[in-house]
Amino acid sequence: MRSKTSYFNPTLLKKNLSRFWPLWGGASLIGALFPLAFLTILIRENALFGEPMSDPLGVTAGYYQIVAWILPTLSLLYAALCALAAWGWLYNPRSVGLYHSLPITRKGIFVTDFLSGMSMMLIPYAVTGGLAILVSAIVGGLEPVGLAVTILAVAGQSFFFFASATAVVFVTGNPFAFAALYFIFHFIAAGAEWLVTRLMTMFYFGVERYYQGVVEFLSPTMYLTRKLDVDTDYMQVINPEGWEEAVLESVTLVNGHLIALYSLAGVVLLALAWGLYRRRRSESAGDVVAVGWMKPVFRYGVALCAAVTGGMALYSVFFAGYETTRTANPVPLALCMVVCGVIGYYIASMLLSKSLRVFRGSWKGILATALASAALCAAVALDPLGVESWTPRPEEVGSVLLIVNGGNGGSVNARLTDPALIQDILDVHQAVLAEREDLNKSWRGLEGEDVSVAYLDITYYEGEIGSPHTSRMYNLPCSRERMERSQALQKLAALAANPALQEANIFEDVSGENIEARLTGGYAYGLYNPETKEMEQMDLTADQAKTLEAAVRRDVQAGHFGKTLFLLDGAYEEAACTGNLALYYSVTHLDRPQAGAYSQNVSLSLSVYCTETLKALEDLGLVNESRKLLTYAERDALENEEKGLPYTYEDPYSGYYGKGFFPTETVYPEQAIVYPGEEVDAALLH
């Protein structure tokens, strides 16, 4: 009689399931609580056997949300436990000897244990899903297409994560190494990208690089959680009571095909695991890394990770506070990386050899680690790709998000699409880069200078709406002397008062093609009462608000808003007012009329340069002898007067008046005064 080879052993499968029933049984019990809780709610509300659900797609949307936002993380963690249950015997020499003495081939053991682990993965999902389907069917919330997609998504993710855990099992030789390498395997790509971006941030002026997810597809949990989404479409219908309501029309699992792609990757990982098991030596049980050719990868991988993470930490502790620039010095950082890389090399060597005697004959590895660490630091610091000096071409930019915080107060925050304004922003950006050696100074490098710091944040977008192309963030030291010599700061000061920029900054939330805004009122606050010596506020009627809005828009077009952003040495206190305005709007989005109207406030900081607005406040009687609009300097003078202290002020910007440093164009020259005491060109008055 011919012998017959079996690739599956049902006895071993039953033994595995019976041994680890607390794992899959406990998970099943926890999962069953959710549909049972839903059933309890239905019973309490007497809705169990009432009318069928009119919106079964809502149940489908709930299934998809679990698949997209919960299942990847849950499967990642649970797959590790199931893999340890199914393959844990590989980490004990006696268990390995026992298994390999059984009358089962290695292929039979592999197939049976893999099916055991997959069964433990799927049983809790089957129990939870079965109860959820039963409850949904009772209340009429069963939707076949959504149910089928959910089942396939659960099975696909379970297979991939367990296959990846199985592959890591055969690389390692003990459970602690498995746990560490399993999570490293899933997050190493994202972690490496984050470390490189942090190095770039340390070296490049203005480059605040954050995690971009360029290779995030190699970190499946993060990628699935970010890419999977639920898309719902609603339609407006008239219900039997005559009211209009939104009814769910369709539900889609966005990027659901990614689960299928990762399932195919799981097949590759499973084949790799089988290849590793075929060549796995029984004596490798207990080793950190059980595959010989992967030991150098582990040793130098740990060394380089330690070099980057430890090097940056060591540098921040011992060197960062002594630098005269905001960017790092590559020489001490490279030294820190070399030291930490060598330490990481020895730690990895000790783990691999399970001994502290790893120093003899290690000079070649130490030299290679030191050279690699220094080379990595130099490769980033030299900026071969020109990241620090990069600016986009105008045709590459669809819109720009600009944020400017002045040295002593005020800010601009606007999303811009005007090509002319985008070109002005690019000119400022290029001017900043041209002066980066002077502007890239830390507080230590500015010792002896009376400076404040302005903030410039530019984010370029390829289209009007969409993901950002890239962004740059600059901290710019400002002082009277620097403002005199710096073309970049002068251009930035002029840009801050640009009418188109200020229009977007002030009225962006209440203007646009698809926005209908109705002015409903407002209030003026911070008005000084000489009798009570307190600050007061006044509500504005709709008519008063309209008058003030028109005056504000005239000031915007005249370039009066934004002039205080770069006033220094007390000039800001002399020009900025303590009183401000708030305008109330009722806003409706014409492309989303079903959302209804909502309230939107526009707050405005006033200064002595807002001549149109100040005149309108006086004409309306809101500012008079009993309610005064003070500057900060006037307020301080009053406080000093009450205390019996003298107050004097000398304007340090008197030398700038009439020299074109600040924009002087105005559409209402007969009323607009650019600076107090500045003569208006007589030609403009006619």
Image: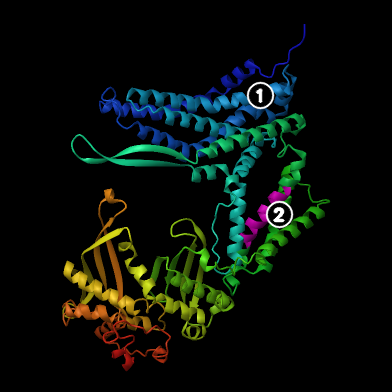
Left or right of 476, for residue 347: right
- Upstream in the sequence, badge 2 or badge 1? 1
Q: What is the distance, in whole Å, between disc 2 and disc 1 at their CAs?
A: 41 Å
Which amino acid lies under the numbered mark 2 shown in the image of this protein? Ile
**Extreme residue toward the right, this view:** 361
Label at residue 384: none
Q: Residue at x 65, y 28 (%)?
A: 87
Work out whether residue 186 or residue 237 is closer to the camera in this orientation and state it.
237
Q: Is residue 20 magenta?
A: no
The quarter in which the N terminus is drawn is top right
| Residue 187 visible in the displayed image | yes
- Residue identified by numbered label 2: 343
Q: Position of residue 3 (x, y in %)?
A: 76, 11
**Extreme residue toward the top, this view:** 1
Q: Which residues are magenta?
A: 299-314
Label at residue 111: 1
Q: Position of residue 480 (x, y in %)?
A: 46, 85
